[in-house]
Structures are given as C-alpha cells and as structure tokens.
Image (spheres, coloured by chain):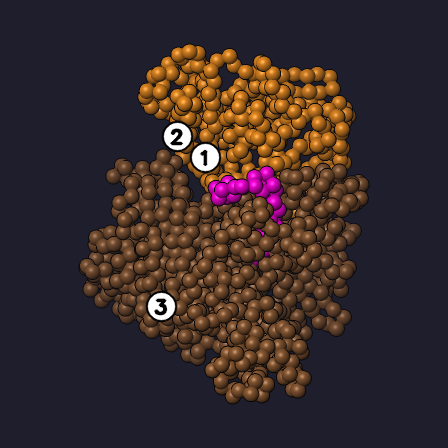
Amino acid sequence: MYIPDFNYHKPKSLLEALSILKECEKGILIAGGTDLLVEIKKGVRKVTDLITLSGVSELLEIDNNDDFIKIGSSLTHNDVMNSNIIKSELPALAEACSKVGSHQIRNSATIGGNICTGASCADTAPILLAYEASVQLTSMDSERLVPLKDFIINHHVTTIRSDEIMTGIIINKSKHRTVACFEKFGLREAASISVASSSSVIRFDSENCISANIVVGACGPIPIISENAGSFLSGKSLKELIASDDFLVRAGELASNDSKPISDIRGTADYRRHLVKILTVAAIRKSLNQIAN
Amino acid sequence: MKQLININVNGTNFELAVNPGMTLLDLLREELRLTGTKKGCELGDCGACTVIMEGKAVNSCIVLALESDGKHVETIEGLAVGEKMHPIQQAFVEKGGIQCGYCTPGMVMRTKAFLDECPDPDSEQIKEALTGNLCRCTGYTKIIEAVETASLYLKGKTPEIIEFQPQKSAMDLTVVGKRLPKLDSPDKATGRAIYTDDIVLPNMLYGKLLLSPIAHAKIISIDTSEAEALPGVKAVLTGKDVPDATWGTSPPRYDEYVLAKEKVRYVGDVVAAVAAIDEETCYKALKLIKVDYEELPAVFDPFEAMKPGAPRLFDHKYENNINTHVDHHFGNIDEGFADADYVREAKFTGNRIFQNPMEPHCAIAEWDRHDRVVLYTSTQVVHYVHHQLSRIFNKPLGDIRVIMTNCGGGFGAKAATNYLEILSIFLAKKTGRPVKMRYSRKEMYLYGRGRHKQHITLKMGVKKDGTITAVHQKAVLEGGAYSSFGIVSAYYAGSMLTTLYKFPNYRYEGFRVNTNLPPCGAMRGHGTPHPRFAFESLLSMLADDIGMDHISIRLKNAMTPETRTCNDLDIHSCELKACLELVRKKSGWDGKKGKLPLGRGIGIGCGGFVSGAGYPIYRSDFPHSNAIIKIQEDGSKATLFVGDADIGQGSDTVLAQAAAEALGITLDHISVISADSELTPIGFGAYSSRVTLMGGNASKMAGDSVRDKLLPTASALLNVPADKIKASNNKFFSIDNPEISIPWADVAKTYFSKQGPLTGNGHYSPPKGLGGNYKGAAVGTSPAFSFSASVCEVQVNLETGKVKILNFWDAHDCGTAINPMAVEGQVEGAIVMGMSEVLFEDEIFDSNGKMVNPDLHNYLMATSADIPVIDSSIVDSYEPEGPFGAKEVGEGATLPVLGAIANAIADAIGVRIYDLPITPEKILNAIRSKGQE
C-alpha cells in the first residue's frame, strides 16, 4: 500500500488557498484526510495536486451570533462535540459527531470533510439537514450560501465548484422552542458505520409543533428528508404527541416509507426500513422528553 | 519531489526531506527508525499506529508526514525515562495487559492522551476511549484494568493489592502457580520489542506478490518484460522459475505450487513475485505484468461443488471436489437411537472467520555467500517452516536457519509455512540481496487459512433422564481452493465431539470440499468450534424438550477422569463437573434460568481441547518439544533454549516458570531464547494448544537435569546428603534444617569451576500408541484434555435485534495453572474473540469470488466497548501427564463461547438462530417468524 507522489500545496490563509485552488485545475482539497488518504491508498482515487487546509486558521472557529451559529469547516468531530456552544445550542449535532468513527478518527476527520465527501452513510449530514443548515462556499470571486439540502445531490456528489472551498456550516437559530435528537444504529457499539440513522429537529410554539424535520441517514444515496413524517407531525399539539405513541409510530412508518435503502453487507433494505421506523420513533420520543424534562 | 519538514519527536527536533506521499507512520518507522509504532491495517481502522500529535491521539498511517511539519509528536519510545517505564507502561506490564504486544504501543499512546484529558475515568469511559484500538489477544479486560491502575499511579496512589488463593496443586510451589508479569512485557510496553517488519538489513530489497484477480482460470501466458524493465525492479518470478514440486501443510495433501502453474483457483492465488528497491516500485511493477487468463467456470458453494458436472478445481484428484472424506462409526447409532426416548435433529451453519492477528505476516530472507539461507519470520511454527523450506529448496535443515522474531499474534494464521517465507528466499537467491515481504491487511485475508465454514447436521438421542444414547454428525466444510490444514480440520470436526460427554454410539461423516475461494486452515479450536456450537445448542434444545435443566443435562453426561471415549481418546484429569457447578453458582443460574424477562437470557456452553496433538503433522520420530538450559559461569542466570514459539500467549514466561521451579530459582534469574532453528532445539511450535504441556515438560526436565547435576556439589558444600537437599528460591538447603543453606549461584559456580559448562537437556514426546487403529484415529489424540464451562447472560433489543453480551462466567480445568494471570488472559481473549465471531464476523464474497470486506472497516471485530464483564475461574485439577500438573487453555477457551451465547440468545428471545454470525437482522426475523406461528 502506498500513496503515489503528488504536488503538495500548503496555503497559510484562506485567500492563498483560494488562489491556489483557482490556478491549480486538478487541485484536490484535503482536510483531515481520513477518507481521502484511504481512497488513495486503496487505489480508487488518483491525485496529482493536494491542497491542504491544515495551515488555514480561518476555518477553525465557531461563531455564535444572535441569529446563527457558524461552524468552521476544518473543525474536527472532536472539536465540534467538545465545544460548549455546540453542546448547548446544537446538542444533537454533538451527539452525531461523537458517533463518527473512533476517537483517533474524530481527532483528524473534519466536519467539512464529512459533508463534502458526501458519503451516503455520513453521520453529520442528516442532523445538519434536520437543523436546516446551509453551507458557505467561498471562491476567489464569490461567496454563496447553499442550503445543505441543495448541496448533497448524490452519493459522493455535491454542488461545490472546483474553485470553491466550504468555509463554514451555518445553522440559523430559531425563536421557537427547538428539540433535536440523533439516533444511529451500527452493528457494534463503537467505531461502526451507520446501518441507518434518524435525525429529528422539532420546533414548537407554546402549544403546537410548528415544524418537524425528520431526516433518515444511510438509507439512500443521500440523507433523505422525510417530507411525509415532517408534515404529519406539524400542527400536532405537544400534549397529544406526548400522550400517545401512535403518532410517533405513524411518523416512523412514514419516514420508513420515504427512505430508499439498498441491501449491502451491513443489512438488507427491509431491515433498514425497519430500523428507520424504530430509530425515528426513538429520536422523536427523546426529543419530546427534552421538553418534558 | 521531496520537501523539507521540521518535526519534534519525543522532544528532539528533526529536519527531514520527505516524499509527499509518505505517511507519518512511515516517517517514524522508516526514516527515524522508531519502530515501536506499529503498522496494522494502514487504513485507520486498527489504531496500532496511534501516536500523539499536538496532544491528540491520531492514526499515523493516515496522516501525511508533511502535515506533521512544525508539530510535536510523541511516540511510544518517548514515554519511558531511561530504564524507568512510564506509569502507564508499568500498569500494562503488571496487569497482564500485554500479550502479543502488537497493539500495545498504540494502546499505550491512546491511554496517555486519554488520561491526560480525563485523569479519573470509570471503566465505561475507558471502554469508550479505547474503541479505536483493536486488540485480538486480550479481550481488552486486562487492558482496561491496566488503564484503571495507570490512572491511580499517575495520581500518586497505590492500587489495592488483591490476594489470590492458589490452586491446591500449586500450594507448595514457588514460581509455578504465581501471577507473574510476562518476561517480554516490558520490551513490548516500551516499543523495543522487534517484530519482523521492524528489521531492516543492509542492501535490503522489498518483495510483493501478484495475485489472481479471477476465481478460476487457465494461465495462457505471462509477459513480465515491462515489469522487469521498470527502474528499481531487481527480479520477477513466475511459475516457470520455481520447481514443479508442490507444498502444503499435511503431507497427503500437498497441492500448492510456489507460484501458479497453468491455473489459478481463487481470487488471491499467487501468480508472480517481484523484488524491487521499495514496495512502491514493486506495486508499480505488478501492474506491468501482463497475464493472459482463460476464465473457467468457478464454484463457491460446497454443495454445488460436490454435484456431478460441477467445475473441478483439480482435474486429477479430489473427485467431485471432495478434498477429504471421513466416515467414522463407533458403537452402533441405530441401536443408540432406538434406545433413546427422544431424538432430535437440526442443521447448523458456521461462518467464515479470519484470525486477524494484529500483526500482518512478514518475512525477510537473506541468502548468504555460503549458500545458506536465513529467514526471519513471524511464525507460530519455526520447525514446520524449516522442514517445508528444506523440502522445497532440497537442502538439509542445517543449511537453513529460521528465526522467529516477536510475533504479533497468530491464532492459526501463522501455523503453517506461507508464500512470503518461500518467495522471499527465491527472490533473495535470484538477487543476491536480502528481501523483505509483508502482507497488507487485504493480502492477509486473501492468503486466508481462517476458520472453515461448516454446514452441520446433528442428530442426538437421549433417555428421559437426559442420558445421551447416540450422536450422528454430518459436516460439510467449505475448504477454499487448497488443502492447507484442511484434512486435519475435517477429522477434528468429528473427533473432538466425544471428549466432553460420554456417549457410546457415534457416527461422523465429514466432507471437506474445495471451492474457488481463499483456502481455509486452522484457527483457534481447529475444526471444532462449529461442531461444538451445534452440539451445545442441540443439547440445550433436547433438555428443553424433555424438561430438564441445561446444566443438569450436562452434569448427567459429563466426562469423568480416566475414561476412554467411544473413539478411543484417553481422558486423564477431568474436572468438567466442577466447572459446571462453579459457573452455576457464580452466575446465579438457578435464580435466573427461566426467570428472566423477555429479551434477557442466560445460556451455558462447555468446551475442551487437546493439550497438544498426539502426533506430528508429518511423520517424524523427533521429540515434540525440546529444551536446553545453560547456566552462566557465575551461576547468576539460567538461559532456557526452547524451540516452541511465544506468539503472545506467554509461553516463554510459562516455560521459564516451569524450568525455574525445577531448577529452584526465581523467575528473575532465568531468561529465554526461543524459536530459532540454529540456537534452540526443535520444538513443533505453537499450534494445537501444545506448548504448556509439551514445552513445559521439556523445560521442566531440563531444569530437573541441571538441579540434579548440582546436588552432589551442594551436598559437598553443605555437608548434607544429596537426597536430603532441596533447591528453591535461589538456594540449596537441607530439607531437615532449612537454616543450613547456600546460594544457588554459589553451587553452580563451584560446579562450573570444577567440571566445566553446566547445561541440562529436556525433551518430551507424547505417550506411544495414543488413539485407536482406525483411519484418522491420530487426530484428536493428546496426552491430556482440557475442560471448561461458560455461562453467558445477554440482553437482546427486541426492536432492533441487537445483542449486548452482559456477563460471562467461565470456569476452566487447565490442570495446574502455571501462570493464572496468563490463563485469565487466554480465557478473556477467547471469550471476546468467540463473541466477536458469533455476533460480527463473516467473510463475504461477491458472485465472482472476490472478497467484499477484506479490511478492518467492513470486517468487524469486537472493540473494547462491546465486551462483557468476564469472571474467569480456574478449578482445582492436576494432570499427571503435564508439567506440575498443567495442561492447555489457549484454544479450549474458545470452545464453550459460541454455544453459550447461542443458548443465551435463544433463552432471551424464545427462538433459536442456527447459523452464524447471529446478526441483529437474523434475530429480528426469527422473532417475527415466531410471532407469526
């Protein structure tokens, strides 16, 4: 196993990184490298020019504003899950980060990398979709904000342009009471790839659910936003949701129906659909419990 | 183009020019020669390469060296201060947290970073923290204890000292029976221990193998010209360059060529070998070798393979692809089943498991100018490698030297000669330079030799009182492309069913079938875990059918000492009943069985194994284990030279304990040189769980011999008759008046001064004539058999089908435990490995015979977070044939595990899973189909 030689670029600022990226047509960005280097070693990916983001300190901050939180794309999963801001404002994201790989992987792998790699089993993408996150894409010439749901379009395919760097992930704060949960099923207790996951972000006004985002992970080429489960839950009162499991089970079924799993070595499509139901019910229930508590 | 970096490693600054593609791991190992950091998977899955960079634990195999520019890196070499180990290292040594040692540096570095952040962890936090570091030996239990102890040391506290009750048979012994840290553990804890891949010889080349991408094909032609023309390539070999002789493991089934001739039989079959200045050049050269294949139909399922007209792997042998057929009938099963009040039959299916030692196979060959070859290798069996090389190269043993380095685990994967060992020598011969060859993790899977997947039909009859009247087992073993150990596996699958319970009537029909998949071989418990899983499952099912308790039915039929089984195996010591009673009590069985809520379950399984095969793999009259002890001229130290191999199980220490006890010295006065064909007398090595008994007997005999030689000298010095003198604790003393004593070293020094070198020899051969007279009767024979019982408690999530193994209570009859801490280490390791086999592991192939999950990312093994709480007990027992009463533990400990878990899951969900692995999905489907009944 080896990594063939490549041209190595180590910009010291975002501006320099963008300029190299613009000039270097075949330039590939590397952050933590935990996916990219494995792909190169396995021989499934060829790289001639690698531009590392490790020297770009602008991408390592978490901005906690009144209206939104911006997470720097080069923060590792451990950085994110250990951040007090994230733990208090976006606890389900912290939870999802804690379920990615092993401790060593989480020390290297970045949240931006997890999103940009666009793997169907990525764990941060579904919960960020449920939080209605957007990604900030910056090039020499422009900066744009793209809703995450428009960013990941297929397994390992995103809408990032070759001259762009994902500089941040932005999650707007809601004025409404928000509860969220990330539930994952892996075959072993730790360091396992999701067989399925379910993320829920539910918002309430004083009495009623005003929006519910249920996002299913690892059950399709990209994380799937279950429109049916979301619209089913919207409008339900907190009281009725807490009073009866029937609504939760129905939401789980709808999420399950919306998922598009395949069969692979980790599980059959049927089993995944079943898991989606169970995980969705659990995610919603745990979300509701946050209010009850 | 190389780029300059500045890196601080363990406090020292280095300015280095590195290639962009170099990883931090290779920078440390190859450039700085800090080889303590290990290469296990190269893809960030195993954690063996963990180092601390800027205070954070990272997998150095997936960090570019360039990315360490300007950074501080700490490696295992930086922890100890001079001779003084870091408290974490100290704790790992003392607590028995180190076996093969290959995961140890990564584990220690992860622990360091973890305790820096979290100085006061509980055991759950520790389990969670270590999930990125896979260990195949220890079952994590002692590692977790070590981390707990380390955290106390780091806070300046002293851990509580626990007194252990010795076994009755070890009461009067001073070294044997003691929980002593392994002799090699400080070396392994500090990263000093040298494994084969850590060695770099001057002018050394690297070698790599071209593996077949097709499952079954004729080789029409091979063009190596482009590969040979590539700068840096020094040799390319194909089938035409190697002898026509076949090789293998079992002489009746030598069916592998050194390099494929005419045909390839599986994806991974070895087609060509390349030597070049580095591995990268080798890989580039492999891509330039043009092989023209004519694809042939392939067969992957053993039942399909046996059908008339199925593709044949070998045209002139193994009709219907049946590589081995066994038909044994003892007593009369028809009468036995007629006598039964109740008969039940069921089908069980095992899984294809790979041993996955953390260290990949590696060999270095050096063909010297005197036409002699030296091979460094990570092997379990120096002698069998030696023997096979002697055959292949047509040279006497004396012209070949095989040196086993430290070995990072084997479990059977390294129990036979492999392609690296042979081809590194061919390449060294061709180039005149040393050649190193190592497998990547994927190449390990493709070399194979893992556990055979068995398809078992088992029928058993019992009386109303639970007495077993007859057993009929049919087993089809999916063998893969070549024989390897397979003939023996097929016999073991049948022969070992008889040692735990008494039954007079038994028939075994076994078929080992060739398929176009990687060859299967010997893995921990060789051939017997799947039949044992089937047997323990069916026995519990029958108990339910006749309304009998699962432990009671086992007690009813349990083997007793000094019994000859129906297939002529001689059982001597046997404390199976004591094991059963102990786990019944410790697990609280009577209060739990049948009383747990749905989803919670408890199950029992029993096991046992040979303490070394009664006969060698090829016909030979050499004693199976041999030892020489040499005493330093001043008497300060004994050196034990023994041919058997310490592959992490701790045999060097155990053999040294046996020798030291016999000599009358303490363990700090003995060192061990093992497994070097030049220096050590022949030993058959580490397989069939043989070393403690056989190597132990040889070592004890050598110790006895030295001590007896010294008695006359001691007698003269003490002025006490020789038959009234005893040696122990580094003294010779009068038995009648222990005050009259003299230091052991003084006696030895006096002897040496007057009579010259002081040495002693020991050897061991199993008793002659073991076993019956039928064909295949040799397989299963042993001087002694171990016994064990395990109770397992599980929680099954009824919604997802996921199993959490909560507890294991194991009791083992290993005779006298020479080192109880090492015995526990074997049991804990076997339980976690067995659990991992039952719940997670399976080799999966696509429709073209290509393995889908040849890495540690997709082939899942248990992590520290998956393990149960393990209570491991050793019952009082004494084996007359063993050294100080000892017998095996290593392989036998695996055997109760599969059945115990299967029974516990069945108890939890009220329905049984018959095929391994028992995945959440299978459980859920079983629960659903039961609901529909």
Q: Nearer the viewer, residue B264 or B360?
A: B360
Callouts 2 and 3 on one subunit: no
Check residue B852 for magenta coloring: no
Give the magenta part as a residue range: B100-127
- Using a 10 Å C-alpha cutoff, classify the residue at mark 2 as few (fewer than 14 neighbours), some (14 to 19) or many (20 or more): many
- Using a 10 Å C-alpha cutoff, classify the residue at mark 1 as few (fewer than 14 neighbours), some (14 to 19) or many (20 or more): many
In the image, what residue occupies the spot 53% across and 33% down? A98
In the image, what residue occupies the spot 49% across and 35% down? A194
Q: Nearer the viewer, residue A202 or B861?
A: A202
- Chain-order first, disc 2 or disc 1: 1
Residue B204, given in percent of the width and then of the height, sits at: 74, 59
Return the residue at label 1. Answer: A185
Q: Report the chain holding disc 2.
A: A
Q: Quadrant of the N terminus of chain B?
A: top right
In the image, what residue occupies the spot 29% across and 56% down? B551
Callouts 3 and 1 on one subunit: no
Residue A74, given in percent of the width and then of the height, sits at: 65, 29
Could you say which disc has been placed on residue B574 in the image?
Answer: 3
Q: Quadrant of residue B879?
A: bottom left
Return the residue at label 2. Answer: A278
Check residue B121 for magenta coloring: yes
Kind of residue at badge 1? Phe
- Can residue B417 be seen here? The reply is yes
Q: Quadrant of residue A173?
A: top right
**Marks 2/1: CA–CA distance:** 10 Å
Q: Relative to residue B546, is residue B187 drawn left or right?
A: right
The secondary structure type at the circle numbered 1 is strand
In the rendering, what colour is chain B? brown
Q: Main secondary structure of the magenta part?
A: helix
Q: Give the letter of the orange chain.
A: A
**Marks 3/1: CA–CA distance:** 44 Å
Q: Quadrant of residue B493?
A: bottom left
